[in-house]
Image (cartoon, rainbow, N blue to C red):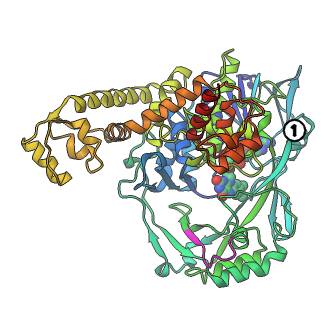
Amino acid sequence: MEFQQQFDVIVIGGGHAGTEAALAAARMGSRTLLLTHSVDTLGQMSCNPAIGGIGKSHLVKEVDALGGAMAQATDRAGIQFRVLNARKGPAVRATRAQADRVLYRNAIREILESQPGLSIFQQPVDDLLLEGGRVAGAITQMGLVFRAPAVVLTTGTFLGGKIHIGMENSAGGRAGDAPAIALAQRLRELPFRVERLKTGTPPRIDARSVDFSVLEEQWGDAGAPPMSFLGHRDQHPAQRCCWITHTNEQTHEIIRGGLDRSPMYSGVIEGIGPRYCPSIEDKIHRFADKQSHQIFIEPEGLTTTELYPNGISTSLPFDVQYALVRSIRGLENAHITRPGYAIEYDFFDPRDLNYSLETRAVPGLYFAGQINGTTGYEEAAAQGLLAGLNAALAVQGKEPWCPRRDEAYIGVLVDDLITMGTREPYRMFTSRAEYRLLLREDNADLRLTEKGRDLGLVDDVRWQRFETKRNAIAHESSRLATTWIQPGSSEAAIVASKIKGTLTREYSLADLLRRPELHYVDIAGLKGEPLADTQAAEQVEIQAKYAGYIERQQGDIERLRRSENLLLPESLNYQAVDGLSHEVKQKLSEARPATLARAGRIPGVTPAAISLLLIYLKKRG
Ligand code: FAD
């Protein structure tokens, strides 16, 4: 058979963005090539061995709802699962899994290798093939030319990557991997705005040198909640404990003593680092009055003794790293297996992208992942999936799919990047989504799987499971609304004991479910058979309990959509708008957005503020 060099879609980079991009394009029927430095590092987690967390699991579950791999790989690799914010409302609840690095990589590789229509080839890409102002393919280090009308670039931290440990620095894409220098230079010749960012990672520690007896244990949740809609806890490998320890005054003293040799504080590093994942030297400097910082000690996997001390990312010189680690309780005799480091890399201003993630300057070329100024595996995976599916749509001559802010966190992520750009590594939070009550992780499938099916991303197995669940929710919600409990009945007595009161009139099961003291398990079996599917049952409960809030948010969206293009006069005096906070007035006065929709995208300008603005404009006539 001839060596294939013509494809529909080429994806460059086999990280979290690249693997989802390649899978999405191939699922949609495109002949897809994934070109990457090394087949052995497909799906490699460059930093912490964990997937999910607040805001991030929402993205993972959306990728999953659209048929992606990240959540399924997490279920096969997760060694500790927890639901964060479990006691808070469902909008901010998030699943986080500690993952075995090797199992995760293996799972991703197996999913890639079983995907029909997807070829994998190991070679660094040094150049892009451009023809008539469009991308036409990629050229590898050994001069092989692969052609395709759409190319998705997902090279992560590798473009012009520079690794720093103390005052020493060297070229690298991440520890142990070569950077992409030739490609970075080539991209700098094209009309993209390029800047530098940085990120860092902590030193790793050998568990055999740690005194666990003085550390606080932290186990996962008993139910080990799966990450994927198709996942089940029986798939999870053995579960492991994590531990908690803290820095102390001595640690802080050691760090302060090393700051003169810190590449960050001596001006060697120019790139800005992640605000929400700062290095330990940054935390000591910024929060000078804090006497201690929490550190999570997380296992790197089931077959290694390496530990990841989450919270002490650093680029201080190695002697300072060594001393600071050994000043921490439980780590007094710790053996460091790998030094921590920071990495600086090129990223492209995402304001130069279309909503489909296609670059404006080079048609057919898409950017996804860390190169768009984001940080995190989940943010990368979400962009990869979107870029891959839009590349496939473009090749089929179809319109792109660009989810709105009220449809998906993926929409929020892309809208934030494209309208505002970023000056520091961007990570997702639930607070970035103004419609977070609608965009919950528990309903990612209900929001997106049907769309995924239409796009060709969702296979029959997922679709059938989804339809079964959706039908079960509909039937059960209607059963609860039409099943009545009479006052004085034996069922009413059971309810009364739970609510510590009496039922004085007839109530439907749906009415009862809206009461804060009652849950689905309390009322569903009072009359008739409760649902066996716990996911569907959870959905019935959330939809009933939050119906009022959800309707109100849907109303906000409808109103905003109807008035999205409403022009805001240049001369508008925001100080005169009743009810707006001082902060919102100031933000609007400074930004002077042209339309109501743009006003709504300014961070901190809430849907409630937009409603007030709308009322003011209507009154003003
Ligand atoms: P990557 O996962 O980096 O994947 C890029 C892929 O492209 C790799 O497979 C690479 O081999 C390939 N590639 C690159 N250039 C070429 C080329 N020319 N030809 C062929 N293939 C190429 N995230 C957090 O959320 N929190 C953190 O604390 C954090 N710390 C980090 C610390 C370090 C040191 C590093 C390196 C990353 C850190 N990250 C952190 C970021 C996280 O690793 C990334 O956000 C995520 O991996 C981005 O995914 P990606 O697919 O965009 O890129």
| Magenta residue check for 291 | yes
Q: Quadrant of the C terminus?
A: top right
Residue 403: x %, y % from top left: 60, 29
Is residue 175 something that shows in the picture?
yes
Q: Left or right: where does residue 328 sit relative to residue 500? A: right
Residue 328: x %, y % from top left: 60, 80
Residue at left 50%, top 54%?
Answer: 97
Residue at left 72%, top 51%?
Answer: 425
| Magenta residue check for 262 | no
Q: Left or right: where does residue 541 sit relative to residue 77? A: left
Q: Which residue carries the number 1 mark?
A: 187
Q: Left or right: where does residue 141 sit relative to residue 210? A: right
Please say if 172 is above or below 336: above
Residue 93: x %, y % from top left: 46, 50
Q: Quadrant of residue 287?
A: bottom right
Magenta extent = 287-296
Residue at left 55%, top 78%?
Answer: 210
Q: How many numbered circles does the render carry?
A: 1
Please say if 513 is above or below 205: above
